[in-house]
Each structure stands twice: as structure tokens, then as C-alpha cells.
Image: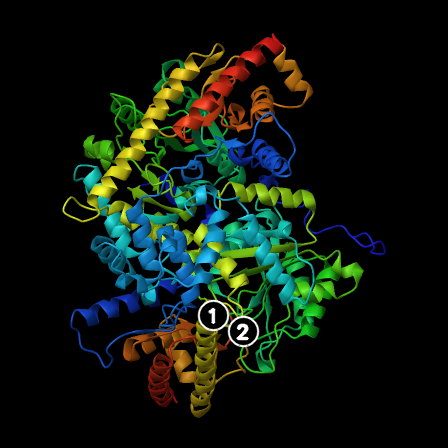
Amino acid sequence: MSENCEYRERVLTMDTMNPNVKRVEYAVRGPIVQRAVQIERELMMGIKKPFTEVIKANIGDCHAMGQKPITFFRQVLALCSYPDLLEDSKFPEDAKSRACRILQACGGGSLGAYSTSQGIELIRQDVARYIERRDGGITSHPDNIYLSTGASDAIMTMLKLLVSGEGMSRTGVMISIPQYPLYSAALAELGAVQISYYLDEDNCWSLDISELQRALQEAKKHCSPRALCIINPGNPTGQVQSRQCIEDVIRFAAAENLFLMADEVYQDNVYADGCTFHSFKKVLFEMGPEYSEKVELASFHSTSKCYMGECGFRGGYMEVVNLDPEVKVQLTKLVSVRLCPPVPGQALLDVVVNPPQPDEPSYDTFIKERTDTLATLAEKANMTQDILNQVPGIKCNPVQGAMYTFPRIHLPPKAIPEAKEKGQAPDMFYCMKLLEETGICLVPGSGFGQRDGTYHFRMTILPSKEKLKIVLAKIKEFQQHFMEQYS
Amino acid sequence: MSFLKEISPLVNNYFLSGTDVLSRRAAQITAEIQQGERRSYNEVLDLSSGDLHRGGIKPITFVRQVLAACFYPALLEEDSLPLDVKQRAESLLRECDGGSIGSYTDSSGIAKIKHCVSQFITRRDGGVPSSPDNIFIKSGSQMALMIMLKLLIRSDDSCRTGVLIPVPTYASFTLALEKQGAAIIPYYLCEEQGWTLQVEELRRALNTGRKTCNPVALYICNPGNPTGHIQSRKSIEEVIRFAAEEKLFILADEVYQSCMYGDDTEFHSYKKVLSEMGSTISSTVEQASFNSVSKGFMGECGLRGGYVELVNLDPAVKEYASRLLSTRSCPPVVGQIALDLMADPPKPGDTSFPTFSEEVQSIKNTIGKNTVRILEVFAELPGISCQPLKAGYFVFPCLHFPPKAIKWAKRRQMEPDMLYCLHLLEESGLHVRPGCEYGQRKDSYHIRLFVATQENIMEDALQRLKTFHTQFMKEFS
């Protein structure tokens, strides 16, 4: 500011700003990540540290940690982007035919044209067919499919529709503790009431209906509970819900008139023996018309996880079930405001739901790449839980699915007051120290929610096997040292 | 009965009416024709949306080649792509984690790309400094605008937050404001003077607005949509002075800044003009300027690449803006790359420059020819008048309906220009939008036509409009 300007109070200050924005936190990209980025800069400037690189095991970004994109998908996107390549003999025919089909559905044959806000119709049809195949033939209507800018966009949209009322009638939304902090951030931003239900750490982070019941009854005293969010496979916990559990949740939602939001972005990431992904939609319809005609459900999926790992494309969709037709009109209007989801993301989604078939030239390579990626993740999941469980002071539930481990850490008595002195949550204090001493960036459990007096961290299982071994060894070493230092 | 019927009231109140009707009917007619139905035309001509590629203009080759190489880096090993394409793709991939455009990026955008954008802004503004720290890349300028609105609008207050917006203004913005719970304070652009912004009108609107809400922001669209007007430097200064006096936050939507026609038109960015207005104003007036890859010669609406540049924002507020952005993870990487290419296109001496500049010039020529042709045709027609077309993608002529036509529309409980558009679509297969969607003075009617389409399509559209309009005016005289 120049010296001779008169002091003028700004229009937009912390006091005049929308107060809901102040409550928004998102730990996955929060203060610890900012410090990690700073440290990276310091390393680049030549400042000496006890490590040579920062390992970002905080965010579920597969490609960043070395996972390779699926060749076929990238070939189709390249062809869509620059159709002159259709003349290039180095591209396989099956990739070319898919590219042509997608481009025909785009305005002016270009990925650069706006699509309708709900998403290109052909692609929604393909997504509907994918869902039908996945769910053993249960019908899916393209009109109930809304393509989105990643699953997060669709989740925000549904929450916007759901949140209303004031005081006692203010919308309450049930979310798990621990949860992926997009939900808590969204509820804060929308000024909705967060209704926390605890997952059972002693039982592999399973969902307990009596706990749902407890949370709901408590919440009814001060708000109007309207929705129940489930993440399956779970983030950060990695649990894969049993079929029985999903049925119980559906029954609960039906009885209590709750809108179900099923975040299923990790649906291909299932590793543990005896665990299977059951889509909420499939289970709902197999429970008969008493439920399938009544329970309102929105299921979310994206191109960011599973074996694709294409987070940067922002491709995703939601499928809505039993939505009131008038509400659907409002939903369609709501999505029209953001014009349309990125068309490359839509195109990518189309190839994901239309992968090479056994009789096609790209099939073998595709299957190999997909299998290798998922198998590697499974190996890393097992390795992670095995190694961490050998560390005194760390207890790790099985990583049944998704991409993370959320171990419980027992903090020695002196650590907690020191954390308090620094104004940090104890697990933040732990993670910050770990970052400074080893260069490993994790997210403290306090960013996801946990029972009082318990501490956790979330680590991704995404670094390469070799790197992951080193990371786990360093964590072990750090934990031992930390225990000694603060006992 | 779903409880969701008591839906969030913020979503229920909307400004638009009948939008879907026209588009739905256009799609229906297209389907009917495809199924063999015979009409006096073979296809629907869609001049309804600001979509360059849909209108038949081809994407810029350099842009698509770089994108292809980023999607599928194996292309970098081949000879088929020019050297500068490969170099650009390589340098962009180096900025991506794991060398992949499938990775997340920083939530405000890739640092190098923000830097590139800041340099573009500085060059554009004749040296006025621009910092990447004040630039936030989003999934289209619309999303960036929504984030700013989210910061400004206090939807829970009993006294609503007011935002001044021009009439006419594009439809989805009004919807966005309503959704966020803002009170809309319309200010009328002066059609007779080429859709100029008059400060007296701003003052009138503000004083009216203050009676019922708390006005905090002033939204400007320059170049204008749908009007195609360009603000003079003097006009921009007046507006900034007004915002300074009245303590308003300026939202400057400048997405059409590279669509300029005619030799005497010049774009002045709000940032540049602000910086030249003396330190009191230049260091205090808060501003957010928006731009994107959707318009201009690139027309890459589907890629969703846009940015906001913040000026004089409270640092603490900026921190929260950043946090808000981070919950949306990151803008699509493809859109970010397109922004980089827009901000730093091929230069003379680059391998791709000749093709690039030819393609850009060809688009400019096409639009230039179209705008001349449009005004020629309108000049021949009774009951249609048009302000000079200076910039943007649209023309917004005024329709002077005879009283009989107005009565006819009233009987059908529809806005006359909406009814006109429906019949134009039905009888001539031409899809344009009615002025009532954008707002207009009482008893004035308009239509909005997209002008950046292939010349033969434009000519076809103008002939259809001419035929229909002539018949229409005769029938209702």
C-alpha cells in the first residue's frame, strides 16, 4: 500500500466475509501439506536435512506416486483431442473406434464444445449400461445419471439440495467418524448440522446400527436429520462393508426417512480375502420393492481412484434413485449453473465404462495393466498393515480396500502437553515432527475425526513398493524414538 | 412423497423461465427430422450458445497437438508432431506430479501455469505487475466467479447481500446469484447509446438497492454478453471511482477480451485502468477479474479452464479463498494446460507459428465478415434494429413488435420474444435465444444470436431469419 493513501476499510474483510467460509477446513491439503511444500523448496535451495526428498503420502494421488496410466485410455483421449491421429497407424483400431464414437457425440465433433450440464447423453447411456452389468442386470436409467467434475462436485450438489431450514429444522447430515473431510467441509460451508456417528475401530472400523441410532436420536433434539453418508470402501479407514451391513443401513435409512449418499469411488480397490464390493443400489434392489421403491439414494463414482488414478481429469458421476421428479428438475437446474463437467473427463469416463473386450486388439495389454496395478496395491496394503502392526505403539486395522491406512498411535504421556503448548492437536504434533525428521508427509487423524483421546494418522499405500518399505521402516524408527523421547 | 420436496429454498427460486422449452424443442425437432419427418428445412441451425466448435469452427491445431502429447506422451517419441509442440508438452508434463496429467495439482493451479498467466496479464496491461499469488485457476471462469460470490454473500443474514448486475446479463449468472442467496440489484445498460454503462444509472440502482439489502459488489461484463459492447477507458474510470466512493467490490468478467472487431475498438482491462488511477484508488479498490479459454479464438468451453486475478484483497480473506478452493481438490489439468497455451501461444519464429496465426486470422475474418453481413441484413428488415457490434460472440438486436404481436403473446401468457423464438424455431429451424432470458427494459424485446459460426451457416441463418421475420411483421401489422 502506498504511503499517501488514506486508510479505507475494505469491503471484504474477515468480519464481512460469509461466516460459513471460516469454518471450512480440509486437512488433506491443510497446514501439514503447506509445510511439506515449504520443506521441498528448502531442499531445492540446498538446505541440508536428514532426508533428501519429501514423500507425499498424504493425498490419494496414484500417478504422483508412480502408478502408470492405462495406455488404452490415454490413446483414446489423444485421438479425441487431435483427430488427425486417426490416420496414424500406431494407434489400435479399438481405440480409434471409441474415439470416433465419442467425438460424434460432442458438439462440432470437438472435446472443446460445451456439453449439456447433465453430461453427454451417449456417455450417460454407457455409464447406465456399466452399472447394469456391474449390478447383475438391475436397470439403470441414463436420465438418473449426472456426470460431474469428479465425485466431489456431485456430492456438493446433492448436499446443496438437501440443506435447508433453520434452528430446529436445519438439515442434519450423518457422516462417519472418521470421514473424508470433504463432507465436514461441505457441511460447514453450507451451514448444515454435522451428525457424527462413530465407526467401530475394534471391529475393523465396521458400521454399527446401534451407533447410528444413538447419533440420530441425539441429533433429533437440535436439528432435522435428513441424510446419511457412507463411504464404501472407506476413506480413511479402508473397510469394505459386508452385504449384511449394507442391508442394515438401508433398513435404517428406510425406517428413519433418511436420504442415502453412497460414496463408492474406491469400488475396484478391494484387497482382503472374503471382502467384496456390494453397491448400495444392487443391495437396495435385491431387498425388494418395499425398499427399492422407497429409499432415496445417490451413489457416487469417479475416474480418480481404482486402477485408473486419473484425478487430474475430474471425471465422475452420480446415479440417483427414487428422486422426486420435481426435485430432479431442481437438480438439473442446479447443475446447469456450473455449465458442464470437463468434457475430457466425460470422455475418459466413457472409456472406463467401455474398456477393451476380449476380442479386441488392446484387450491383453489392458487386462495386464489393470491386474498389475490392482495386485500391486493389494500387496502394498498387506505389507503396510503387517509392518505397522509390528511397531510398538502403532495398531493397524486390516486395509481391506481403498488406498489408505489409518493406524492408531499411542502417544507417550509427555507428548500431549508439549503438543498443547505448541497449540497443535497431539497427532498433528506427531505428524509435523515426523515430517521435519523424515520428510514423510501424512495427515493427522484429527483431520478426519476420531474418538476423544485417540490419535491416528492417515497414510496412503501409493508409494512404490521399494519406497513404501523405506517409508514404513522410517515410521517405525521414528515411532520408537518418539516413544523414548516423550515417555 | 419425498421430504426433499421441501427443497432448499435457495435452489427453488430461479430467474429463468422457459429456458428448457426452446432447447428441448430444438432437440425434438432434430430427432424428428432424423426419423424422416419432412420440414421446410433439413436441419436445425443452433445459434443459441456461445460455443465456437459447435458452430463449426475448428480447434487451434497447436492446442490440440500439445494436449494429445500430454494425454499420450508416447507421441513425444514420434516424428509426427512439430518440435515446439513436443517441447511445450514436455515442459508442461515436467510440472505434473509423476509426469502425468492424471495427477492432482495445487488447488489454485500449477505454479508454472499461474506464472505464465501472470506474465500474459502483465504484457496485456503494458507492464502492470501481476503476481501468481493473486491468481486462482478454476474449472472455468464461472466457477471462479462462484467462489468469489461464496465469499461475498452472507446468505444467513436477515438483510441480504446485494450484487449489482447489468441488464441485460447472461442467464446462468443470474441463476447462480439466486442460488447463493444474493439480492440482485439490476442496473440498465443504455441501449440507445450502444449499451453503455451510465454512472447515474448505477447510482440510481444502488440507492434503490440500499432500501432492501446490503449491496457489496458490482458485477461488470466487459466486453458485454449479450450486448457486444466495449467499455471506453473513461467509462471504466468512472465505474471504478463509483465503486471506490460507494465501497463496492468489483467483479470484472472479461472473458471476451480477445473477441474484438473493428479497428477502432480497444480492450482496457479493469486492472490496468485501476492501476493508473492514483494511489488512493489503485491501492484500495478491491477487484476480481475473470478470464477463460472458453471464448476468444480458442473456444475451448468443454475443457473448463479459467482464472480469477484478485486485486487489493485482504490477505486473511485470500487465505480463506484458498482454503475454499482446496476442498474442490484441483481444477482439471487439461483446462490448466489450455490456459497456458492461451497465455503463451506460438510466437514468430516458432515452427507452429505460421499455421497458428493463419488459423487465428481465419477465425477473426469469419467473425468480422459475419458481423458485417448481420448488420446488412438487419438494415433491410423492418422492426429490427441493432446497436454497433464491437466485441464478444453475440448480437442482441431489438425487435420492435407491432401491438398485435404483443397482444398475441399476452394471450398465450408468454413473453413476446420467447414466442417469437419458438415460432422461429418451429417454422424456420433457427434456434436463437429470447431477450427475456437476459433481462431488458419493460416493453422492449430482443433476440440473441451467436455470430462466431462458419460463414455459410451464418448466411443460411440470416436468410431463414429474414424470411421468417418479414412474414411475421406482415402478419402482425
Quarter residue A133 falls in: top left
Earlier residue among tags 1 and 2: 1
Question: Residue B167: image x %, image y %?
Answer: 55, 69
Q: Name the disc covering residue B92, or none.
A: none
Question: Residue A378: image x %, image y %?
Answer: 32, 26
Residue at mark 1: B297
- Identified at 28% across, 79% down, the residue is B427
The verdict on a common chain for dots 1 and 2 is: yes
Going by the picture, which residue comes out furthest to the top? A487
Q: Is residue B282 left or right of residue B11?
A: right
- Identified at 35% across, 49% down, the residue is A147
**CA–CA distance between discs 1 and 2?**
32 Å
Question: Residue A148: image x %, image y %?
Answer: 38, 48
Q: Is residue A392 left or right of residue A252?
A: right
Please name the amino acid that badge 1 sits on.
Phe
Residue at mark 2: B441
Above or below, B384 against A385 in this view is below
Quarter residue B404 falls in: bottom left
Q: Is residue A483 left or right of residue B421?
A: right
- Identified at 40% across, 31% down, the residue is A464
Q: Is residue A355 visible?
A: yes
Foreground residue among B389 and A444 = A444
Q: Chain of mark 1?
A: B
Please name the amino acid that badge 2 sits on.
Arg
Question: Residue A143: image x %, image y %?
Answer: 27, 51
Above or below, B300 against B115 in this view is below
Q: Quadrant of the N terminus of chain B?
A: top left
Q: Quadrant of the C terminus of chain B?
A: bottom left
